[in-house]
Image (cartoon, rainbow, N blue to C red):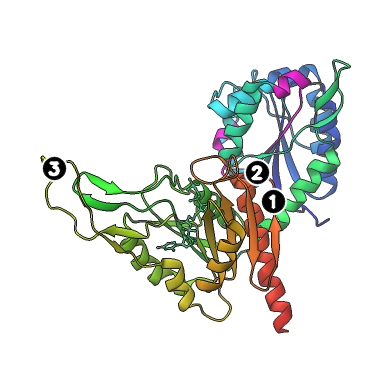
Amino acid sequence: MSSLKGKHIVLGITGGIAAYKSAMLLRLLIKRGAEVQVVMTPAAKEFITPVTLSALSGKPVVSEFFTANTGEWHSHVDLGLWADLMIVAPATASTLGKMANGIADNMLVTTYLSAKEHVMVAPAMDLDMYASSSTRRNLATLASDGVEIIEAAEGELASHLVGKGRMAEPEEIVARVDRFFSRSGEMSGMKVALTLGPTYEKLDPVRFIGNYSSGKMGCAIAEECASRGAEVTAICGPVSVYPSHPNIRVVKVESAAEMHAEAMKEFPLCDIGILTAAVADFRPETCAGHKIKRENDEEMTIRLVRNPDIAAGVGAKKKEGQTLVGFALETDNAFANAERKLERKNLDMIVLNSLADKGAGFRTDTNKVTIFSRGGGKREYPLKSKREVAADIADAIVEYREKRQTDLE
Ligand code: PMT
């Protein structure tokens, strides 16, 4: 394990029996060199005293917005900016609900809302609460907001019932922290160019041919690469939410032709190019200047012409040292089609997602992928949140580039 020396961590503790484990977690983080600021909810103090936690962290514990006798204000904004990472452990059902819905009625949730960097939560609660649809919904919302969920483990619970709901052990949480920091500088100095979202092909001033892409998969990949230190240019089709991170430059386009023009400018400058967009293969041959009126005819014919294939275009101009990653969205013959696209478009890797898999593909917060690499590698992954899938894709890209480098040496 690498050292956490100099890393700023906010440890949020909420009111559950597992709060006693947070003292051990705090000790492990401090021993590994991190500077830790503890933020407790008022209920957490019923389970563990601030005295223990301030003695272990070497800092006064923050719990209220003001210190009652001095009137000193504790700035959640400053804490959010200071933190390289925030961990909420244990996270009760109540705090998860507040975080998922922005109910900022205590110092811990306001700090979460101000946090600029990565956030992890380690839930702990009774088995039925953990399995309840409201907790599942809140966890899914947090996962799609980019929060890393450290799932609870099975075992004996405070109620003496046995089931899933025990907070992950401090050692497991520290291992996740370690993995996060070892990944965080992994792409620094690299340029990533990425296409995401759908394209709209205009028929007239009010109508277009489009598709169901929400841009969620592409946003998650852009943010994952940015959080690993890459400088990212995201060429975005018309989506409602754009990727957000200081390292990301967003270029907005609408049609495949516009996306193609931007990609041909940006991709030659990148080390890693990722094509997540669902690009229309065809566009109407002409776009009417006025709204097309309903004629008396029972039928209408629209003549379509081929759009440029952006992936094949950048693939044909691929430079030494560049890594190009495409996606394949399939409904049948998935593996064979994906492998064919990898070859035909001169890509290094292709990420297959199939509409035959429940929870995969367009608009969902989850995806299930298989990653094919040039040279025959193939890895299948289970259904995960799109943010976790993005991390798997980024890991696979880093591994592929390292292997290529070693093969050259
Ligand atoms: O946006 P979401 O709602 O989160 O959904 C994500 C997604 C399903 C859109 C995404 O995961 C995905 O599969 N994107 C690729 C969709 C697609 O167009 O697949 P394809 O098999 O038709 O294309 C193969 C590859 O060529 C893709 O990398 C595509 O970006 C690229 N392509 C295709 C046609 C074209 N004219 N230009 C291209 O660059």
Ligand 1 contact, mark 1 (Cβ < 8 Å): no
Q: Which residue is mark 3?
A: 297
Q: Quadrant of residue 258?
A: bottom left
Where are the magenta residues, as a range?
111-131
Residue at 19%, 59% (x, y): give it.
286
Of all residues shown, which one is farthest toward the bottom? 409
Query: CA–CA distance between discs 1 and 3?
Result: 50 Å
Residue assigned mark 1: 381
Q: Amino acid at mark 1?
A: Tyr
Q: Quadrant of the C terminus?
A: bottom right
Residue 250: where, in percent of width, then height? 41, 55
Q: Secondary structure at mark 3?
A: loop
Residue to which mark 2 is pinned: 384
Callout 1: 10 Å neighbours few (<14), some, many (20+)? few
| N-term-proximal mark, 3 vs 2 | 3
User: For the point 58% across and 40% down, which residue is it?
Assistant: 359
Residue that protrudes farthest toward the front in the picture = 298
Which amino acid type is shown beneath numbered disc 3? Asp
Q: Are marks 1 and 2 in contact (CB under 8 Å)?
A: yes
The relative height of residue 373 versus residue 254 in the rendered view (above or below) is: below
Question: What separation in Å lies between label 1 and label 2 (alpha carbons)?
Answer: 8 Å
